[in-house]
Image (cartoon, rainbow, N blue to C red):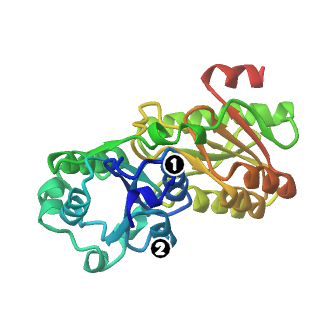
Amino acid sequence: MHAESLNPEIPAGDIRRPIGVMAGWGRLPFAVAQALRKQGRRVVGVGIRDHADPRLAELCEQFDWIGVGGIGRGIRLLRGWGVTEAAMAGKVHKTMFLRRGWWLRHFPDWTCIKAFYPQLLTGSKDRKDDTLLGTLVAAYARGGITFLSATDFAPELLVKAGQIVGRPLTAKQKKDVEFGWQIAKEMGQIDVGQSVCVKDQAVIAVEAIEGTDACIQRAGQLCEANGFTVVKVAKPQQDMRWDVPTVGVQTLETIAKAGGRVLAIEAGRTFLLDDQDFRQAAQQLKVSVVALDESSVAEAAA
């Protein structure tokens, strides 16, 4: 497929260097690819096996698969397609690394082994998200691929401050948001997770390696009275090239099924996917959603 066929408004001779999308699990890779195409950019995709949706290939000029350990292959694919800049989009389930034989399907190649030697073989470095992803970005940079933030390509996906949908929060819910915000920021500071579930200013569940949905589900099992609040924020040291907080319809469905009633997210530092569908789902599921920043959190609870 030629670049001009993606957007007939681009002159036939205007061949632009493609942007690579490193795609993990979820809807975000689609949103980023669609945003790039609307800008008239050429898009190529590298899907992480067992994570990315195969339908993403329909939005890409070129698309192929790699295992989590296939860094060398990823670099070769992107360079072969003429890519020098790429964006990460979507989640990689870290619980995979705790399963027996994960490496058989996601076999680390030599480039990966050299980059992650301290984690894979010596244990001299930790396996926190920022450590792993920083090492990954550096390995791709050595191969000629610079990772930029997906926010550079799709800033319209970042949620703006305000009451997004649903009923205004009660005074009690505002207190829970303020309390949960402080806890979530502390957890982010030490790179544990981005989300906490609270009720009556008590922590019910904290996200770690299991991810946001599993954290919410655990909160629902523990809080039989229901009505809890989910707070999801960026880390204080958030690198916007990776692991940017993301919410969508599935987040709302998980909250509602678990018995939650409020979702508080960080304005300007959280991706909100499928905006119209998100708002409709929140109304139907009776989940109130609010986007705040540091300055407005205390005001909301005052």
Res 116 → quadrant: bottom left
Three-letter amino acid code of the residue under disc 2? Pro
- Residue 222 is left or right of residue 286, and the answer is left
Considering the image in quadrants, where does the N terminus appear?
A: bottom left
Q: How many badges with numbers are in the image?
A: 2
Q: Which mark is residue 272?
A: none
* Residue drawn where x is 49% and y is 44% of the image: 244
Disc 2 vs disc 1: Cβ atoms closer than 8 Å?
Answer: no
**Residue 273, x across and y down, in percent:** 63, 51
SS at mark 2 in the image: helix
Callout 1 crowding tier (Cα within 10 Å): few <14, some 14–19, many ≥20? few
**Residue 193, x across and y down, in percent:** 49, 47
Q: Which mark is residue 9?
A: 1
**Residue 168, x across and y down, in percent:** 86, 35
* Residue drawn where x is 49% and y is 69% of the image: 58
Label 2 belongs to which residue?
Answer: 54
The one nearer the camera, 211 or 69, is 69
The one nearer the camera, 142 or 93, is 142
Residue 35 at least partly seen = yes
**Residue 22, x across and y down, in percent:** 37, 57
* Residue drawn where x is 18% and y is 47% of the image: 144
- Residue 45 is left or right of residue 291, and the answer is left
Which comes before the other along the chain, label 2 or label 1?
1
Considering the image in quadrants, where does the C terminus appear?
A: top right
SS at mark 1 in the image: loop
* Residue drawn where x is 30% and y is 71% of the image: 67
Q: Is residue 218 above or below residue 138?
A: below
Three-letter amino acid code of the residue under disc 1? Glu
